[in-house]
Image (tube, rainbow, N blue to C red):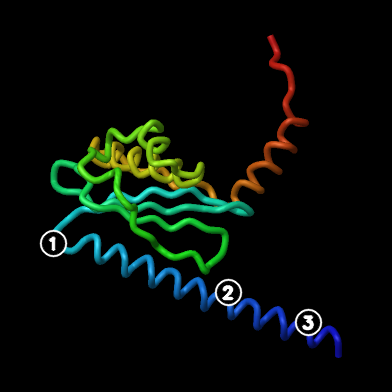
């Protein structure tokens, strides 16, 4: 009976996590849509966090790449919500944001990295490139295991 109860609790936790993630994704879509109103483009940056706070930054930009407004979401759980930047980034060119700009705004580390990621993504896209997709946690794990076993197979080159 105890195992059945554990299975039911695990299933309920899974469904609850899925529902809360769905709600958070709807919030992301809503804020993205609001920033896109009026034909504006949006620069997005992120800093993933597994056991520490992750961050997502969205900047509404005009045709020249000047920031009109920005929003961010920072947190560890699905209860994190988007907030507007008070001020500081408006009027700056998104492609030239730097660590100094983030320090001037007193941003936390993950949020600063997300801002710099948005700047980098903007520069890559405007240059005609494609933003690389970071590996998933499972992919990083399998790459690490493969690398571990490949070290033992390496042999010295023959001359």
| Element at label 1 | helix
Residue 78 position in % (x across, y down): 53, 67
Residue 63 position in % (x across, y down): 13, 46
Crowding at dot 2, Cα within 10 Å, few <14 / some 14-19 / many 20+, comes out as some
Crowding at dot 1, Cα within 10 Å, few <14 / some 14-19 / many 20+, comes out as few
Work out whether mark 3 precedes mark 1 in sequence or the reverse, and give the earlier one: 3
In this view, the mark in front (1 or 2): 1
Checking the image for residue 49, the label placed there is none
Residue where numbered disc 3 is placed:
6
Residue 137 visible in the displayed image: no
Residue 13 position in % (x across, y down): 65, 78
Figure label count:
3
Residue where numbered disc 2 is placed:
17
The residue depicted at 45 percent of the width and 47 percent of the height is: 111
Work out whether mark 2 precedes mark 3 in sequence or the reverse, and give the earlier one: 3
Work out whether mark 1 precedes mark 2 in sequence or the reverse, and give the earlier one: 2
Checking the image for residue 38, the label placed there is 1
**Residue nearest the observer in this picture, 6 or 67:** 67
**Residue nearest the observer in this picture, 52 or 29:** 52
Crowding at dot 3, Cα within 10 Å, few <14 / some 14-19 / many 20+, comes out as few
| Element at label 2 | helix
* Structural distance between the alpha carbons of marks 1 and 2: 34 Å
Verify CB contact (< 8 Å) between mark 3 and mark 1: no
Does residue 53 appear left or right of residue 122 in this picture? Answer: right
The residue depicted at 38 percent of the width and 48 percent of the height is: 45
The residue depicted at 54 percent of the width and 75 percent of the height is: 18
Q: Is residue 53 above or below residue 66?
A: below
């Amino acid at each position: 009976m105890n195992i059945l109860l554990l299975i039911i609790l695990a299933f309920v936790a899974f469904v609850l996590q899925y529902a809360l993630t769905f709600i958070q994704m709807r919030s992301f879509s809503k804020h993205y849509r609001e920033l896109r109103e009026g034909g504006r483009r949006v620069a997005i940056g992120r800093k993933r966090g597994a056991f520490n706070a992750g961050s997502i930054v969205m900047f509404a930009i005009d045709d020249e790449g000047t920031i009109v407004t920005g929003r961010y979401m920072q947190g560890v759980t699905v209860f994190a919500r988007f907030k507007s930047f008070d001020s500081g980034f408006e009027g700056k060119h998104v492609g030239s944001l730097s660590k100094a700009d983030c320090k001037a705004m007193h941003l936390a580390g993950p949020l600063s990295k997300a801002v710099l990621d948005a700047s980098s993504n903007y520069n890559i896209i405007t240059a005609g490139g494609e933003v690389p997709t970071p590996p998933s946690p499972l992919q990083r794990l399998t790459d690490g295991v493969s690398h571990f076993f490949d070290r033992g197979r390496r042999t010295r080159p023959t001359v």
